Image: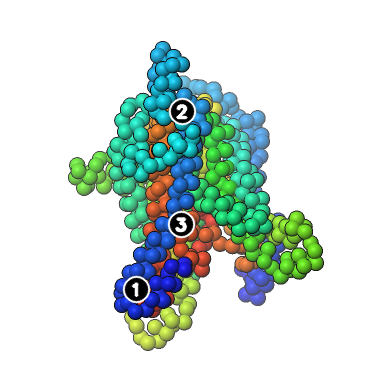
């Protein structure tokens, strides 16, 4: 697409990316359009739904897509399109709650730990490591067993498992900038720690956080869909993306095409979030984005490894 | 690691013993790092039970028999009147001996129910890892060799699509394709290997495939990237100039050096595979650990929930230790000039 010279220039150009330069990528444009549509559905979905998502119609079970029911009906004759539109809000909102919890705990801690001394850093890292060994689905189910089966409990649990990812990536990025010569110069000139963090660190760490937030949002959305699929945190008639999918599962012989609709919806949204994360990553020059570490470091040689992706941090 | 340097410095012993010792100390060092992690994660696990406002004694006794005196007595028997840290210590030391307590409701030992369910998950997890390495490894290697061709682009596109599909969606798609539409394989249930290899495999293959696809896509992408950069290295050109057969260069030199990052991905994906295993259990109605924890969560059977969580977290730690040790071995042997 670009001439070679052009490409090298964009790659080495800046360390700080604005939303504008990210949006120039075609994949990012498509992703933003999809996400805007999903957010629109989350806000207005239940109002715009053509039919009542809860109304049962015994005369129209397992119908295929038709003019009256654009995406067909389910095992109780409810309109699938309306159920998916009405279910968007709960699915999207809870996913963002989880990401917000992870971001609010993890990122400030990641910046702070660099400046708070060795012992704090050691302790915070060990806690993050141990949380990463707890597989999210088992942990969330255990939390709902202990605190009651509700979406709020489930989301707090997911968010609590997301913070180590934010913590690690912010910490790694902060470490890199905190050792830069201009930070040393600023400190010699008498700048306070707070000033250094605000002016020299936070602004540079923001693109890294954007990438992590996008991929964490993808992971959280998957988690919410999966949890609602398992029936955790929702009361049955209330529609959710995962709930629609799980009700389709019991009637595969009557309507084998049905699961593809909610499945596709989940996949497209998750894909858009991942594409946005990739676009941010591509637009940021190589040095600013530290690659994710293995889950647990047990050997010093691992530090030299190039480990691509931040899947684990997201999951 | 400091220990390693010390053992390597003691040059008087034979190189073979030196290497064995170095390997042992590396594994030992790895375990030392893992101990605080295991202690912390098991403490978090245990605290979950303590956080719950459920009153186990009252639940066990039932509504009629739950007089304050009876509840206090049972609390004492169950050890629930002790401080949290003491309770945790008792639980952990018992757990290390294989005793995870008994279910509040069925009185079946937790370790027994876990041992019953574990073969199901191990069957699909191990088959899934094998499938993921086979599919992802082959696709990634061919994509790297034929870089820029339609095959390479096809692998990239398929990988991006597959990574957005969660295991429970993949599982349902597989059921629709192979069980509902084609009637080739059973849609649900589990048969132990004692009933014959084929019936077991028949029930295992679809859930394993549902788990494996996402990991295979990750492995393919990572292996392609690192293999492409390894194939550009000077020593590969050197080997080709010396006239070594391409297959040998690829298998002995390039793949060996490129497989490290893919191995790391496999370790990192292991928790994702566990989530996928729960999905597969639900979609294919398999009686595994996921079903066990879901059922116990509904009845708030805290000892079972804690036991399953501890066992699963231990698996994650052990898999990480194995992956890290393998990586270390892979890189060490290369540094010593033995491997490459």
- The quadrant in which residue A6 appears is bottom right
Q: Position of residue B73 (x, y in %)?
A: 41, 21
Q: Chain of mark 2?
A: B
Q: Which mark is residue B81?
A: 2
Q: Is residue A78 left or right of residue B18?
A: right
Q: Chain of mark 1?
A: B
Residue position for label 3: B33
Q: Position of residue B173 (x, y in %)?
A: 41, 43
Q: Position of residue A64 (x, y in %)?
A: 47, 34
Note whether residue A257 is visible.
no
Q: Residue at x 47, y 68 (%)?
A: B2
Which one is nearer the viewer's eye here, A77 or B319?
B319
Q: Position of residue B274 (x, y in %)?
A: 41, 46
For the rendered model, the colour scheme is rainbow
Residue position for label 1: B18
The C terminus of chain B lies in quadrant: bottom left
Q: Residue at x 46, y 31 (%)?
A: B82
Q: Is residue A185 above or below residue A194?
A: below
Q: How far apart are the two marked residues, 1 and 3, measured between alpha carbons? A: 22 Å
Q: How far apart are the two marked residues, 3 and 2, measured between alpha carbons? A: 33 Å
């Amino acid at each position: 697409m670009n001439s070679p010279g052009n490409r090298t220039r964009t790659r080495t150009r800046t360390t700080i990316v604005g939303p504008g330069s990210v949006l120039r990528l075609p994949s990012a444009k498509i992703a933003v359009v999809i996400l805007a549509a999903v957010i629109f559905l989350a806000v207005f979905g239940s109002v715009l739904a053509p039919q009542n998502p809860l109304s049962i119609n015994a005369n129209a079970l397992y119908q295929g897509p038709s003019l009256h029911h654009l995406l067909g009906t389910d095992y109780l004759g409810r309109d699938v399109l309306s159920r998916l539109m009405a279910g968007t809000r709960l699915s999207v909102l809870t996913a963002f709650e989880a990401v917000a919890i992870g971001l609010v705990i993890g990122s400030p801690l990641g910046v702070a730990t660099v400046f708070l001394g060795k012992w704090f850093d050691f302790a915070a890292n060990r806690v993050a490591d141990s949380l990463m060994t707890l597989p999210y689905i088992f942990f969330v189910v255990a939390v709902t067993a202990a605190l009651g089966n509700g979406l709020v409990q489930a989301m707090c649990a997911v968010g609590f498992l997301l913070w180590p990812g934010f913590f690690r990536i912010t910490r790694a990025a902060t470490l890199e900038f905190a050792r830069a010569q201009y930070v040393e110069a600023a400190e010699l000139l008498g700048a306070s720690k707070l000033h250094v963090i605000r002016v020299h660190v936070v602004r540079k760490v923001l693109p890294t956080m954007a990438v992590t937030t996008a991929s964490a949002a993808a992971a959280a959305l998957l988690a919410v869909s999966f949890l609602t699929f398992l029936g955790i945190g929702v009361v049955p008639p209330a529609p959710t993306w995962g709930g629609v999918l799980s009700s389709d599962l019991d009637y595969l012989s009557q309507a084998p095409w049905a699961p593809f609709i909610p499945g596709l919806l989940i996949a497209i949204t998750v894909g858009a979030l991942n594409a946005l994360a990739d676009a941010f990553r591509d637009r940021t020059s190589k040095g600013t984005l530290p690659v994710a570490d293995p889950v647990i470091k047990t050997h010093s040689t691992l530090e030299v490894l190039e480990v691509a992706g931040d899947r684990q941090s997201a999951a | 690691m400091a220990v390693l340097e010390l053992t390597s410095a003691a040059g008087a012993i034979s190189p073979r013993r030196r290497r064995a010792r170095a390997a042992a100390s590396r594994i030992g060092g790895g375990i030392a790092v893992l101990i605080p992690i295991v202690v912390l994660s098991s403490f978090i696990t245990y605290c979950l039970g303590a956080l719950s406002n459920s009153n186990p004694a009252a639940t066990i006794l039932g509504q009629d028999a739950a007089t304050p005196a009876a509840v206090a007595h049972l609390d004492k028997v169950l050890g629930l009147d002790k401080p949290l840290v003491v309770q945790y210590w008792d639980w952990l030391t018992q757990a290390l001996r294989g005793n995870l307590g008994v279910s509040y409701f069925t009185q079946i030992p937790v370790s027994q129910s876990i041992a019953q369910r574990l073969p199901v998950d191990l069957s699909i997890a191990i088959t899934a890892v094998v499938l993921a390495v086979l599919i992802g490894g082959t696709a990634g290697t061919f994509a790297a060799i034929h870089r820029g061709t339609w095959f390479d682009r096809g692998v990239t596109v398929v990988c991006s699509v597959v990574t957005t599909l969660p295991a429970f969606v993949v599982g349902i798609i597989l059921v629709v394709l192979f069980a509902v539409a084609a009637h080739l394989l059973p849609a649900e249930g589990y048969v132990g290997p004692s009933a014959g290899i084929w019936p077991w495999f028949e029930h295992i293959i679809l859930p394993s495939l549902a788990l494996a696809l996402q990991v295979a896509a990750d492995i393919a992408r990572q292996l392609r990237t690192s293999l492409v950069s390894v194939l550009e290295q000077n020593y590969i050109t050197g080997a080709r100039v010396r006239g070594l057969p391409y297959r040998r260069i690829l298998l002995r030199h390039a793949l060996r050096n490129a497989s490290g990052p893919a191995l790391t991905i496999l370790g990192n994906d292991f928790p994702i595979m566990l989530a996928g295993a729960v999905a597969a259990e639900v979609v294919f109605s398999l009686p595994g650990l996921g079903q066990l924890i879901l059922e116990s969560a509904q009845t708030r059977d805290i000892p079972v929930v804690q036991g399953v969580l501890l066992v699963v977290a231990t698996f994650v730690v052990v898999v990480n230790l194995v992956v890290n040790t393998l990586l270390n071995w892979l890189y060490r042997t290369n540094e010593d000039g033995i491997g490459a």
